[in-house]
Image (cartoon, rainbow, N blue to C red):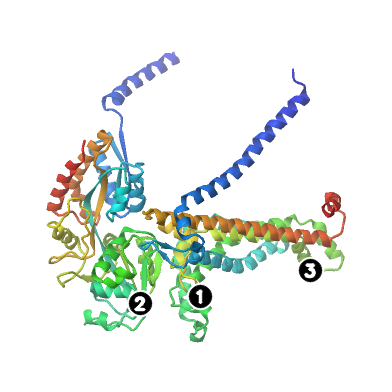
Amino acid sequence: MKTPSSRRSADDRGFRLGTGFFALLVVLLVTGIFWELFRNSHLSIAKFGFRFWTGKVWDPVSGEFGALPFIWGTLYSSLLAMLISTPIALGIAIFLSELSPKVLRTPLAFLTELLAAIPSIVYGLWGVFVLVPIVRQLQVHTPEWMRKIPLFAGPPLGVGMLSAALILSVMVIPFTSSVAREVLRAVPYTQREAAYALGATRWEAIQAALRFGRTGILGAVILGFGRAVGETMAVTMVIGNNPQVTASLFKPQHTMAAVIANEFTEAADDLYLSALIEIGLVLFIITLVINALSRLLIWSVTREVKVKTSRPVGTMAFKAPKAAA
Amino acid sequence: MKATRFLLAAALGAALALPAATGLGQTVQINGAGATFPYPIYSKWFSEYNKMHPDVEINYQSIGSGGGIRQLSNQTVFFGATDGPMTSEQQFAAPGAILHLPTVLGAVVPIYNIPGVDTQLKFSGKVLAEIIMGKITKWNDARIAALNPGAKLPATDITVAHRSDGSGTTYILVDFLSKVSPDFKSTVGVATSVNWPVGVGGKGNEGVAGLVKQTPGSIGYVELIYARQNKIDYGAVQNMNGEFVSATLDSVTAAAAAATKAMPKDFRVSITNAPGAGVYPISSFTWLLFYESPSDKKRSRIMMDFMKWALTDGQKFAAELGYAPLPQDIAVLAMAALKRISI
């Protein structure tokens, strides 16, 4: 005959084991993916070694594979997309959480989130039929002196890095803005009240709120970056798919996800397939590194906040001396 | 009362269902995978065959020639399909001898978008190779003008659009260009994906066609079927006899007919740049792949029966779907080759 308390502790243990198992599944999954990618790309790793990361030639006919143009294209397009989308997404988030009239708030929030629900192939089609012709007109009307700058060099094709960056930024906005909005909404109202009490203007009060929520906002931006790095379909439809390392916004380029999607089906010989899987491995490693760096960034920002605000809040006050010792 | 009626109904249902299950036997499922290019005709064939033999269900995944060869070698599918014949290494890597059977023919056509040009342009293989390699960069280049005396060629830059995905279409084109231009062969070479010296890549026929349609001064290549279905104008290409031939079902079939005499026993033959009059030079067979000594005799017998039908009555479906049917002689050779499958 079990007592209620022993039953409870048995339940607790079962629950803990169950959830612990699920958490472990994630670890297994990640290591499993890494291991499979590594195992299946051993041919290419053995043949090219580190040269794979720096090689610029991708020639399936002669069996020479280098991933640099794809790594470049992925990072460059994602960074450009971040540059374009972050101010817009933050603007949307601030307007919706701080300034918007109540009537507009729900429909606007709904519409921004709807952007995230559009399948990427639809973005791609929109890119091909609407965005690319507009970008081409932009390029056609770029003055001659501007084209001498490497950033704007290249023929007016429409497809290329600029189109890819623009489409990516549209796709990333809903992610960044909805997370940033949630973060701003989670900022205690007392923060703003305190600012107002000190005679702050509305803009200054919002700044205070932004400062309070900056780790979360940084997280929102990085979430958007992660989304941009892995995006495949829409990018491949507008980027021009020509592997080259160039800073030009007008030239066609290529990304890691796009080359895998494009070439995997017809990759018949072993080395070729292995090289494509190694591209997957490189993408996996780069994503891990970006995530680790963002953790580091968030951690350094929170630490800074803790040092600056010397108020003894909750557990933090108890933990601080331990960490110092 | 209700219960007995229910039981009666159930018994009746079972009695009706039983003969259907035992009498006709179970449905036989046969799985294949491979090239995307012949998918429309294969799916038509498999569904027509299923109408005649309701107990046979042939499933085909159009995952690409490379994937088809791989899955056949791993024996995860019963048959494969490819647009480019298997290489000797690939055949060596497979666990058994593999038979290539030609089924229909396809062709690749050059498409272009040049403002002001409304006549059909003519290309020689050499000039086409030089355009695609980026060695001819303007439309009014003397080499293009020499082939097209009547056309008003503008002084605009040429943009080359190619496939970004690995494709049998690319294979057929570069196979032709490598035959006519040693320079192309050494700098680009032959494969389903190549290292393009210049240009932009579009995914699929529709991607390339879209790029060409939108970019003034561009040239690209698509399958003949795709150009016909979408009413895209395409250029004529010079064949070995020196004639400029526009791709039609007849000129493609003629290319295969020209290859009949020199047909190797294993059908692994490229018919690009085939000799003969009226031949369209960028043509190719597409093949189904079978093991010559399969362990599953029952499925093999069914597939042989299917092939006999596809090579005879099935050919009539080719033209309406935009494929060139096999010339009679080749179909006869393929029928004879079926005997090599031991069942």
- Estimate the spatial distance between the alpha carbons at disc 1 and disc 2, rounded to whole Å: 19 Å
Apparent side of residue A151 relative to residue B166 in the rendered image (left or right): right
- Estimate the spatial distance between the alpha carbons at disc 2 and disc 3, rounded to whole Å: 55 Å
- Please name the residue shown 47% across and 60% down the image: A48
Estimate how packed mark 1 is, as few (under 14), some (14 to 19) or many (20 or more) residues with alpha carbons within 10 Å. some
Which picture quadrant has residue B181?
bottom left
Apparent side of residue A320 relative to residue A15 in the rendered image (left or right): right
Q: Residue B93, labelled with which disc? A: none
Q: Secondary structure at mark 1?
A: loop
Amino acid type assigned to the residue bearing label 3 in the image? Glu
- Please name the residue shown 46% across and 50% down the image: A40
Q: Nearer the viewer, mark 1 or mark 2?
A: 1
Q: Is residue B91 above or below residue A162?
A: above
Q: Secondary structure at mark 3?
A: helix
Subunit under mark 1: A
For disc 1, the marked residue is: A248
